[in-house]
Image (tube, rainbow, N blue to C red):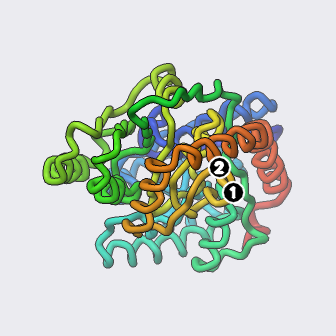
Amino acid sequence: MSGRVLEFLIPGDLQAATGGYAYDRRIIAGLRALGWRVSVHGLDASFPHPSAAALLHAQTVFAQLPEQSLVLVDGLAAGAMPQLLHANAGRLRLLALVHHPLAAESGLDPKIAQALEGSERRALKAMRHVIVTSPATRHALRDLGIEPDKVTVAEPGTEVMPQSHRARGETLQMLCVATLIPRKGHDLLLEALAPLTTSRWHLTCVGSLTRSPETVVRLRAQLRRLNLTEHVTLAGEVDAETLAQLYCAADLFVLPTRLEGYGMAVAEALAHGLPVISTPVGGISELVGTRAGILVAPDEVPALRAALRRVLEEPSLLDLLASGAASVRGTLPGWARTCGQLAAALERCGLQNPADAH
């Protein structure tokens, strides 16, 4: 390999509006700004449950990569093709980018989860190094047999955002930004809010309505069952300008997620100075700290309801949390640090010979 050259293999649509793909886009741009030549190779969208055609296409992509190439494989695909990775580990410098372990995804059939865990365990053994987006994910990889010294944490950055200009009104405006899939916990949020309709509030949920249609069907039925259709808007995906406006107009960010690699939407909310009610998963505990929000255990509807009730009934508490969020806003890391950490890990791996990996 000559110079700073990276082959980046990514399944699905790189422009998709999810935290994982947003991270991929930012590091591609950041590495290029640092002088790296990054070539993006698209893999089939069926990963992490690849079809036979998807695996055949991936095999072709690997075969076309030059000897000794430095290759970063997004974990959504890497964990589902261990045989291909081991077949190429001798001639390529392979790294994985893992946002969270595949088997940890909510709603999986136990047999599928077990198969994914075994597949990802084998796949990561072929890797020279692993990039993760939070210390929590690095810790989780120990259960897959990956020691911490083989893992680099490159936490997502944030941009400087306009601060939320909350003007206390009669109706408290809540915002949730997350793709509508099981692990994001929209169902928990609706159950928690259902008895609180004597207070004036409105929830806007921003996130794809097409990635998991069955989840959306269930949530719409839940809204009807709980008589919340007047209180909740499922807005779908919105453009960046509209999203920024929603952040600035909100009083509170809510995300009762069951699992996160990091929690980029929480970081973005804090970058706007918006207080948070969420869960202590991924990097969210470190982001929110003790002043910028309230964190409750995943899947604990009573605790979530109690936190929401406090904010609805105690305006002074919301003011206090907003003040804490404003103070956190100035301490969030930027993308330059993220890309620098990643570049350093890539350079270390690029100096090693493929044969040294095992």
In the rendered image, which quarter is residue 27 located in? top right
Q: Quadrant of the N terminus?
A: top right
Name the secondary structure under disc 2: loop
Residue 128 in the image: above or below residue 156: below
Which residue corresponds to the image point at 64% horizontal and 42% vertical from the top-left? 7
The answer to whether residue 12 is left or right of residue 322 is: left
- Residue 177 percent across, percent down from the top left: 45, 41
- Amino acid type at circle 1 is Gly
The answer to whether residue 166 is left or right of residue 236 is: right
Which residue corresponds to the image point at 43% horizontal and 44% vertical from the top-left? 178
Name the secondary structure under disc 1: loop
- Residue 20 percent across, percent down from the top left: 53, 46
Q: Which residue is mark 2?
A: 292
> Can residue 80 be seen in this snapshot?
no
Inter-mark Cα distance, 1 to 2: 6 Å
- Amino acid type at circle 2 is Ala
How many labels sit on residues? 2
Query: Could you classify mark 2 by the number of other residues whose Cα lies within 10 Å: few (under 14), some (14-19), or many (20 or more)?
Result: many
User: Which of 207/304 is in front?
Assistant: 304
Kindly check if marks 1 and 2 are in contact, taking CB atoms under 8 A apart as contact: yes
- Residue 14 percent across, percent down from the top left: 49, 36
The answer to whether residue 50 is left or right of residue 307 is: left
Q: Quadrant of the C terminus?
A: bottom right
Which residue corresponds to the image point at 34% horizontal and 58% vertical from the top-left? 192
Q: Which residue is mark 1?
A: 289
> Can residue 193 be seen in this snapshot?
yes
- Residue 190 percent across, percent down from the top left: 30, 53
